[in-house]
């Protein structure tokens, strides 16, 4: 849901700029076309100088509108690429942590799926093994990670994403209030 | 120009808004002016001018736009287009970061025909804007023929050239319609051969996400 929403707002900005670019091009084409046909009918009138200036302004506006749109599109693309790299990096971090804990390949598969939010029933169906086996594997995973339940297990990796957040709690009013609330 | 770390041989999942607006806008205008509006009517001239705007928009974007929208991403190269079609016929599919060479050839053919249709249309209307065409026709309809006087001077020697211009307008317009049929067929064949929907990126960008690597 949130991904969908951010996707829409991400598209809104280029769409607005594209509409602006289209409007400017339309204004430039219609004005220049009208001024040109007038120039043919009655050349070298005083106000053709004014019209040439307006035409120049419209064409320049069109060019700058186009450049602004191009820059926005490129910035969005760079952000998307960075996000893909970041989510790929998180997977690498999790894998490295699993092998540091010495999880077997079956255990790390189950642990990974558990992180993705699958419950025991779903896991047993997906892995084709009994629910008891899955529970035993999860218990072993929690023991190796030094936690006692799934929430704590997931929190280990959320903590990685939050970076040095809690350390700054003394100066960060948001973190301070959330700590006070949890107390 | 920031280089994007996307895989080189993949066209965008979604074409940028300018490419999409000009593509569908021109498609609608071509069909509307060929089938719906009467030649010379204010509506026909209006749509023609909007089409001119969209063509100018796309040509400006071919210089200013992002990498895959620029002319340099899909150069006009008939030999490469033929080679591409030959490989396609033998069941070999190539992937390109922008339009494939045959698609590029089609695009330049469209633009050339559109330029001819627009230019001849402007000659036929004396370069008048749609507002003026409508005003002049309203004046003539109400019995005031004086609106036509300003152009009367060049009228006599224009009639012969006028026929030729009108002929060109019609021929180029029909050529666009034939190209459009070829274009739709080409997209269908390429989509099938490549195993990916080529229409979605031009429409909304909504399609199945690529599996994570």
Image (spheres, coloured by chain):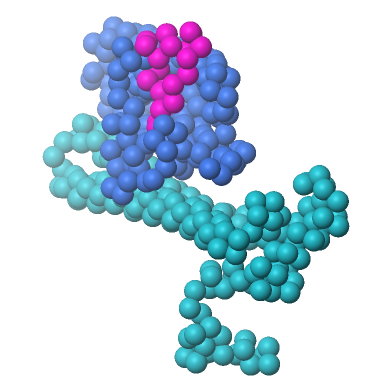
Residue A118 in the image: above or below residue A37: below
Q: Position of residue A97 (x, y in %)?
A: 56, 63
Is B87 covered by the magenta stretch?
yes
Image point 57% across, 40% down: which residue?
B210
Total count of labels: 0
Residue A160 in the image: above or below residue B48: below
Could you tell me if residue B112 is visible in this image?
Answer: yes
Chain painted cyan: A
The span picked out in magenta is B82-103
Choose between B195 and B22: the one closer to the eye.
Answer: B195
Q: Quadrant of the N terminus of chain A?
A: bottom right
Q: Residue A111 falls in which quadrant of the image?
A: bottom right
Q: Quadrant of the C terminus of chain A?
A: bottom right
Q: Position of residue A54 (x, y in %)?
A: 24, 50
Choose between B12 and B212: the one closer to the eye.
Answer: B212
Residue A89 in the image: above or below residue B42: below
Q: Residue B117 falls in which quadrant of the image?
A: top left
For residue A174, side relative to residue B19 (left or right)? right
Q: Position of residue B82 (x, y in %)?
A: 37, 10
Q: Position of residue A55 (x, y in %)?
A: 25, 46
Could you tell me if residue B122 is visible in this image?
Answer: no
Image point 56% across, 90% down: which residue?
A176
Choose between A11 and A147: the one closer to the eye.
Answer: A147
Image point 76% across, 66% down: which residue?
A139
Image point 41% across, 31% down: which residue?
B9
Chain painted blue: B
For residue B88, side relative to residue A142 (left or right)? left
For residue A71, side relative to residue B202 (left or right)? left
Is B66 covered by the magenta stretch?
no
């Amino acid at each position: 849901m949130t991904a969908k929403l951010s996707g829409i707002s991400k598209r809104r900005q280029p769409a607005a700029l594209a509409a602006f670019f289209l409007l400017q091009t339309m204004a430039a084409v219609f004005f220049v076309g009208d001024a040109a046909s007038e120039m043919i009918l009655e050349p070298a009138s005083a106000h053709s100088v004014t019209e040439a200036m307006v035409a120049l302004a419209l064409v320049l506006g069109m060019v700058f509108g186009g450049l602004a749109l191009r820059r926005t599109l490129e910035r969005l693309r760079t952000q998307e690429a960075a996000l893909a790299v970041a989510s790929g990096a998180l997977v690498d971090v999790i894998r490295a942590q699993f092998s540091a804990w010495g999880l077997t390949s079956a255990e790390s598969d189950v642990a990974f799926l558990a992180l993705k939010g699958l419950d025991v029933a779903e896991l047993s169906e997906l892995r084709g093994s009994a629910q008891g086996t899955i529970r035993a594997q999860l218990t072993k995973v929690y023991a190796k990670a030094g936690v006692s339940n799934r929430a704590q297990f997931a929190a280990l990796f959320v903590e990685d994403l939050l970076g040095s957040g809690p350390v700054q709690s003394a100066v960060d009013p948001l973190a301070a209030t959330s700590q006070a609330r949890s107390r | 120009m920031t280089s994007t770390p996307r895989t080189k041989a993949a066209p965008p999942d979604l074409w940028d808004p300018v490419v999409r607006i000009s593509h569908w806008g021109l498609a609608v205008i071509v069909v509307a002016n060929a089938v719906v509006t009467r030649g010379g009517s204010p509506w026909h001239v209006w749509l023609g001018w909007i089409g001119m705007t969209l063509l100018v928009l796309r040509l400006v974007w071919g210089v200013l736009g992002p990498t895959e929208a620029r002319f340099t991403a899909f150069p006009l190269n008939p030999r490469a287009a033929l080679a591409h079609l030959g490989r396609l016929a033998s069941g070999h599919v190539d992937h390109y970061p922008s339009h494939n060479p045959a698609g590029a050839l089609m695009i330049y053919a469209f633009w050339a025909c559109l330029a001819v249709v627009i230019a001849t249309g402007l000659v036929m209307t004396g370069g008048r804007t749609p507002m003026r065409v409508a005003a002049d026709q309203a004046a003539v309809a109400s019995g005031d023929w004086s609106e036509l006087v300003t152009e009367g001077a060049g009228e006599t020697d224009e009639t012969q050239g006028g026929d030729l211009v009108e002929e060109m307008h019609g021929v180029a317009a029909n050529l666009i319609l034939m190209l459009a049929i070829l274009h739709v067929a080409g997209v269908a064949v390429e989509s099938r051969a490549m195993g990916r929907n080529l229409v979605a990126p031009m429409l909304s960008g909504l399609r199945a996400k690529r599996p994570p690597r």
